[in-house]
Image (tube, rainbow, N blue to C red):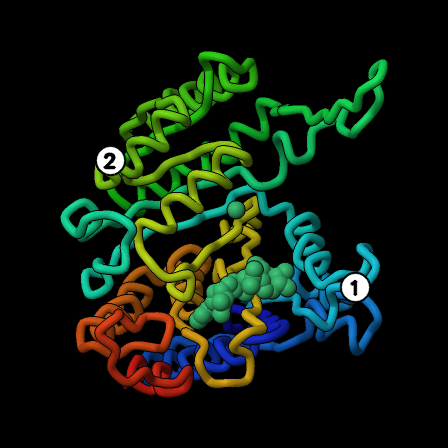
Amino acid sequence: SNPSILILPGDGIGPEVMAQVTRIIDWFGDKRDLKFDVETDLVGGAAYDKHGVPLSDETMARAMEVDAVLLGAVGGPKYDNLDFSVKPERGLLRLRKEMDLFSNLRPAQCFDALADFSSLKKDIVSGLDIMIVRELTSGVYFGEPRGIHKEGNERVGVNTQRYTESEIARVARSAFELARKRSNKVCSMEKANVMESGILWRDVVQEIHDAEYPDVELSHMYADNGAMQLVRAPKQFDVIVTDNLFGDVLSDCAAMLTGSLGMLPSASLGLPNAEGRPKALYEPVHGSAPDITGQGKANPIACILSFAMALRYSFDEGEEATRLEKAVEKVLADGVRTADLMGPDGGTPVSTTEMGDVILA
Ligand code: NAI
Ligand code: MG
């Protein structure tokens, strides 16, 4: 049987950008004989409207069974005043939690045609292609104890950075596996100078390296220095592996090396199943963009590049992933732009569907 994909377009521009991905999936079936069994379902506000919950149990169960989930975006002003337990974001959080997606892949790749959009000088980012692997299910965002309590006359806010060996080991493995598919180089970032969890992080990453991935080049760096180096000379890196908090900050920082939010894909991976395929959720970094919903202005490239990541990391179709990425690179080099990619000198932007058309062509 064909590999299976569950598509969850979600809210706002989610369905608009996902429509272009669906066309691309069909193209691969027709032209490359690469066929997928695709089903589509609801998540976020769209699921709340129909079922009263942002992710139904049936949809959750399908997400656990398929080979990859593609998600558009969730949320929007219509749902801002809902109870926390049924907010659209909770649908996404439930997927991440129950699929145990501990490894969050955020590429920062600079398309030459867009280098002028970078916050940095062109020669610093031109040709940049790095990958930040962020631990996504543990660390200070989840550690106990947590809360706000009273001590004497004042309030104290508490969070706990906590990592077990096995949590560090599995995300380290995921980074080393990835490095083997790229340029075989990993830099691990923590603050081992001031944090116990950082000392353990450094030890465990080194142990996993020595025992299982001695062929991969490994270095360690303090995360604050890492932030400096990302802005000073980002091309020194290939894969960066780091914890949840540092990864949150460093990946947003790296994202701006490359320009528009409409360009940024992501993947979240869990443990591999019997066939060696990790549980996987692919989604653009951007949200539902209510300010441009329904206007045909959304840039579908972040969502399209997320599907390219699915081809590479879930389906072992690296060559086909590259084919798709090259198509995106070509249309950008040809000067085709959605509105979010227009420079100050203007020009005529293409619509979401037109961008899909030229990429397919
Ligand atoms: P956003 O990412 O939706 O939009 C930020 C700005 O970037 C807006 O001006 C928007 O028009 C623009 N933008 C975003 N994606 C674009 C694209 N593909 N093409 C062209 N322009 C694009 O973030 P915002 O405004 O903070 O949040 C809007 C809603 O999305 C909220 O309900 C928020 O909770 C939700 N959200 C959902 C996420 C997800 O589903 N993973 C992530 C971030 C926000
Ligand atoms: Mg962030």
Q: Residue 289: x and y, percent? A: 54, 70
Q: Is mark 2 within 8 Å of ligand 2?
A: no
**Judging from the image, what secondary structure is the residue with disc 2 in?**
helix
**Judging from the image, what secondary structure is the residue with disc 1 in?**
loop
Residue 57 seen in the figure: no
**Quadrant of the image occupied by residue 218:** top left
Q: Residue at x 70, y 50 (%)?
A: 98
**Quadrant of the image occupied by residue 240:** top left
Count residues near mark 2 (Cα–Cα under 10 Å), then give few for <14, some for 14-19, many for 20+: few
Quadrant placement of the C terminus? bottom left
Residue 233 seen in the figure: yes
Q: Residue 135: x and y, percent? A: 53, 37
State how many labels appear.
2
Distance (Cα) linking label 2 and label 1: 42 Å
> Which residue type carries mark 1?
Asn
In-image side of 258 versus 116 (left or right): right
Q: Residue 232 carries which label?
A: 2
